[in-house]
Image (cartoon, rainbow, N blue to C red):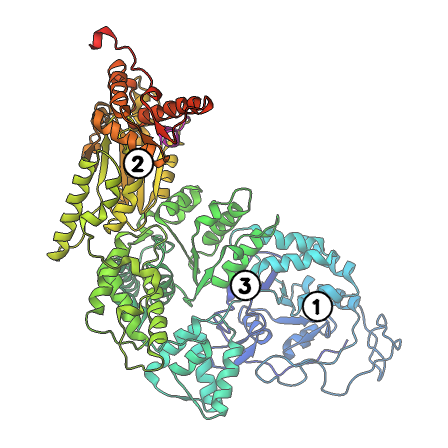
Amino acid sequence: MTAATVEADPPSPFPATERLDASALHGGEPFTVVYGPGVGDVFVDSAYQVCVLEQALWRLLRAEGYERIVFSSLEHPVYFRDEASRDLSRGAGAPAAAPARPGVMRHRQLRGPLGALDVRAGRGSGPGAEPEPAGPARPRPSTGISDPFSVSTLTGYLRQTRHRTAVVFSHAEEILHHTTAPRELAGAMERWAHHGNDRNLWVLVFRKSTLDEVADFVRAQGHFPFLETFVDDQRAAAGHGGTYRVGHPQAAELERLIHAVRLRQGLRIADWRELDPIVKAMAGHPGKALTWHTRLGRLARRGGELSRDTVRQWLGAVSADGRTAWERLEDMQGLDGLKHYFEQLRAETEADGELRALGRATTAEPPALHLVFTGNPGTGKTTVARLVGEMYRDLDLLARGHCVEARMSELVAGYIGQTAALTNRTVDRALDGVLFIDEAYGLSDQRGGFGDEAIQTLLKRMEDDRGRLVVIVAGYPGKMKEFLAANPGLASRFPLDNVLEFPDFDTATLTAVLLRRLEERGLRLAEGVADTLRGLVAEMRRTAGEDFANARDMRTLADGVAKGWARRIRGDVTVPVTVDDLPEAYRGYLPRPAPDPSVLLAELDDYVGMEPVREVLEDLANRLRMRQALNKGGLTAPHMLFTGPPGTGKTTVARMIGKLFHDLGLLRKRHVVEVTRADLVATHVGQTAPLVRKAVHDALDGVLFIDEAYGLVRDTRGGGGFGAEAIDTLIREMEHWRGRLVVIAAGYPADMDELLAFNPGMPSRFTVRVPFPDYSVPDLVEILRRMAAAEEYTLGKGVPEQAARWLDATHLADPAAFGNARTVRGLLGTMEGRMAARFARGRATGGEFLPEDVPDPPAIPRRTR
């Protein structure tokens, strides 16, 4: 065996870099598996030397007291980086070797393609024969050692205890995949694991980003069962003992890299005051030091200067905002509670730092840093999540402070056994920074999926990587409460104090966002347009539903205005924005003058006996016109009670109220949703409230009409039933959607009084009562005439009088069953049947009813006379 040597790196008592420290060597396991996105990177040590992982690992091992450090790769099965290791290895750990002869392999056991002949590329071409330049190692020619012999040689070194030894597989994947001695290597690993010593160490370096990928690779080889089990066990064990992940560079290392390029390649710094934010921006962007090294070197060669703008261009950032994360948070509106939380955290962290400096720090548990953001869309949750990483980095709570925004597809797989690996891969990307999961309840909402597996994996990583990971989950308030309750581990990881609310923006804040967006786009507003927009935003806010996206909707509106303006001005950018530039979808939010009551209520003129309804609607129209004239704003559409017997027009008028209130500007839509008790009251526990909420949501911005509303509480007299739950839910929904919903409850007057008395919240909700009294006999005859006319019939002489007698007698005979207009419609049907009989006998008279077509009045019971 021929072993070549590299000029020795000077021993250092310190680790080569923060990304590779002594904990990598103290796992207490027979192997140390090194992996991670930084394995193929360059490193910058405390002496500002740029080196590859192999060099950094050699220095770390030497600093930890390893006297002999042996490397192995597929191309070079045994090689050294220093003379001392080579000298200690001569004649050790290998079978007896014959004296070397020129052109013949030193060991009798070795055979190559040409038998025992030793064919070499030339002097000094072996691995480590000359000092390596900074950067990745260059390819080296083969040493000609066979795989079985290299296995026995390396394990021989490990078994010896006289000199502390480390064996490093610098490219473990290549060796495991291409070795011609898999059985020998697998056996050596198992023997070392069971019979090795605790002085020496076997290090395997994998160029895989995650431990899951390492496990998958080893499993796919099929030759190394012990190593496969070892990696699986370490992956499942808390803290991953025996494994070490090499991540991306942190701020301190990147600052050393800048200085290394500055000192060696002449890189210039545009403004030294910008160096700190430049370094933080670089650290906040997941990337290799090698990439930064290349960029900085290219900039130096071009004679350019390193500035904040240069780094922004590299990162693809457009904003020229030079404020700190704290300043950007302070400028966000409507988040006072949130700002107080982070200011309190900063005060506590700074106080802890001062105590440590005085030697008075305690061993108390560090504060919980994981957060829950609750709020509707567009309230700033994503923006603040990005700031949290920077703020925590400023407080030395996170090393890098970048933010990984995870989608469900990056956490949950579609097949068994893939979700944990997917979640782990995403968490690995977020290490030393923030993992932000918006709409996190998507994990717990899955039925039959693998969301629970993702939650379990996430909880484990939050514990294992404590101090290196901050998880922020976000979503709608109610759904986030359900999400935290879905798994006991979630509540313990996210304390109640760390649940931060993002309230909906008020009108002033929303208007400010809208106007700022228009200003950022360079638009000027015509006089009065700002006030118009303020009123429009107020109406949007008043009628906002669950899908209202706050600031996001304001940006959408501003962009729509800009498009309308651009179409109108046709290139003349001096023209200001006017109301005409509003998108059509938003014009419905503009105030409208209340219509003249006579015009508004003209439709009621076609109906008989609607004076009480006309009076109520005229009052509303007049009040609205007055408030507009006095600039007092609009009215809130009232909930109403329609009281009266059947057939008096309650349903007909309820169907008209949606249109009438829309024309008054009290409702955005015209629709009316009609429901009865069967639509609102369920037969099983827990089903009634959802039914009521669904009916309300279907009716939003319109009318919910509940006919025979007393039926809701009909089942409560005996103490059972779910009508009470329906009433309670309805009251809550009426209050929550005040201004966006009109509820009309209809029924007999006495029954409606009993309904109001059932729940004390009812009378204060139903503020308008519209009576629908029984029709008078003349009104009923007029209704008959109109119904007949609608069918192109006429009432002949004597028919109105005969119909009046029949209607009066029918009402007196059974008042409870009398249906007013419905009874009239029944009478019309009877009369048409008698006319048809006359038509069959040849006595029809051209569609005119005769007195004989009206049935005789029923007999009136004695008690009613």
Secondary-structure class at tag 2: helix
Q: Residue furthest top?
A: 862
Pointer 2 residue: 652
Residue 472: x and y in percent read 40, 56
- At 69% from the left and 61% from the top, the residue drawn is 159
Secondary-structure class at tag 1: helix
Q: Earlier in the sequence, mark 2 or mark 1?
A: 1
Secondary-structure class at tag 3: strand
- Please, what is the three-letter code of the amino acid marked with disc 3? Arg
Mark carried by residue 641: none
Near-viewer residue (59 or 525): 525
- Up-down relation of residue 83 to residue 178 (above or below): below
Q: Residue furthest bottom?
A: 303
Using the numbered discs, state the Cα–Cα distance from disc 3 to disc 1 in whole angstroms: 19 Å
Q: Earlier in the sequence, mark 3 or mark 2?
A: 3
Pointer 3 residue: 245
Query: Is disc 1 surrounded by few (<14), some (14 to 19) or many (20+) residues within 10 Å?
Result: some
- Please, what is the three-letter code of the amino acid marked with disc 2? Thr
Q: Earlier in the sequence, mark 3 or mark 1?
A: 1
Pointer 1 residue: 174
Near-viewer residue (85 or 835): 835
Query: Is disc 2 surrounded by few (<14), some (14 to 19) or many (20+) residues within 10 Å?
Result: few
What is the span of residues highlighted in magenta in the rendered image?
676-683
Residue 208: x and y in percent read 61, 65
Residue 720: x and y in percent read 34, 20
Find residue 91 and report its image quarter.
Answer: bottom right
- Up-down relation of residue 784 to residue 740 (above or below): above
- Please, what is the three-letter code of the amino acid marked with disc 1? Glu
- At 53% from the left and 71% from the top, the residue drawn is 63
* Residue 319 appearing in the image: yes
Pair 3/2: label in front: 2
